[in-house]
Amino acid sequence: MISYNHMLRHHQGVVALRSISRISSSSRPFSQSSRSFNKFSVRVSGTGRGVAQSIKADGHPHLIQTDAYKFFEGHESAPTPLVYNLGSLGSCTQVAGSLVAKSLGAKLGEWNVTVKGDLDTGVLAEGKDGNGNWESIEVNVRVQTDIEDENTFNKFVSETERRCPIMQLFKQSGTSWKSNWVNEKL
């Protein structure tokens, strides 16, 4: 079993990112492969009442329902945006890792990804001064691989974390970050 730990802490500073946007002249269904394109756009829209909302991605048949915890005036009739936020991080980690493994010629089996986020609710719920971002995020990954070399596993982890857009969103947002990876024999 090979383990990899990574911790990153951003201080209260400004991270400058250059954004390039491109408007596509043709729409493309959500399910088509983006491999032949350099840019991939996703557009979602939502409607709702109170704090509950129905969200749909253009060109995609699925509907996402959200609500909020009672603490945030919700009815808990569906997962909260906070749950989806952390869930998308775990899921995107698996997608990015699968792509990285393919490029490394590695085989993967079962993934077990747990994401824990700590949030000071004072800004969101009470309007207090401060940053409404997650205070800390911890990602724990156990993945079955045929990777036997520790250096190759470490490359797999670092490349997965680099290539995962949602992970990069979290890492570059200023939140405290910790990830733990365990390589389980396939």
Image (cartoon, grey):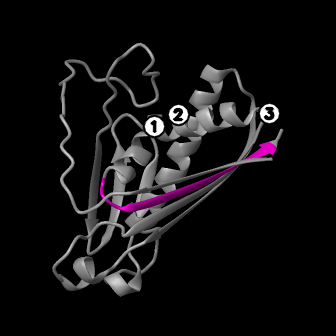
Residue, x 58% and y 29% (percent of image)?
A: 100
**Is residue 68 left or right of 148 when viewed as pictured?**
left
Q: Quadrant of residue 133?
A: bottom left
Residue found at x 60% / y 21%: 103
Question: Which residue is the extreme one toward the top?
Answer: 36
| Quadrant containing the C terminus in the rendered view | top right
Question: Are discs 3 and 1 less than 8 Å apart at CB?
Answer: no
Give the numbered dot on residue 148: 3
Residue contact at pointers 1 and 2, CB within 8 angstroms:
yes
Magenta part of the protein: which range? 173-184
- Residue 90, percent across and down? 54, 52
Q: Which label belongs to residue 162? A: 1
Q: Is residue 156 above or below residue 77?
A: above
Q: Secondary structure at mark 1?
A: helix
- The CA span between labels 1 and 2 is 5 Å
**Position in image of residue 83 (x %, y %):** 46, 65
Give, as a three-letter code, the residue at label 1: Arg
Nearer the observer, 43 or 98: 98
The residue tagged 2 is: 159
- Give me the residue at 28% from left, 65% from top: 48
Q: Position of residue 131 (x, y in %)?
A: 23, 70
Q: Quadrant of residue 158?
A: top right
- Which sits earlier in the primary sequence, circle 2 or circle 3? 3
> SS at mark 3?
loop
Mark 3 to mark 1: distance in Å?
22 Å
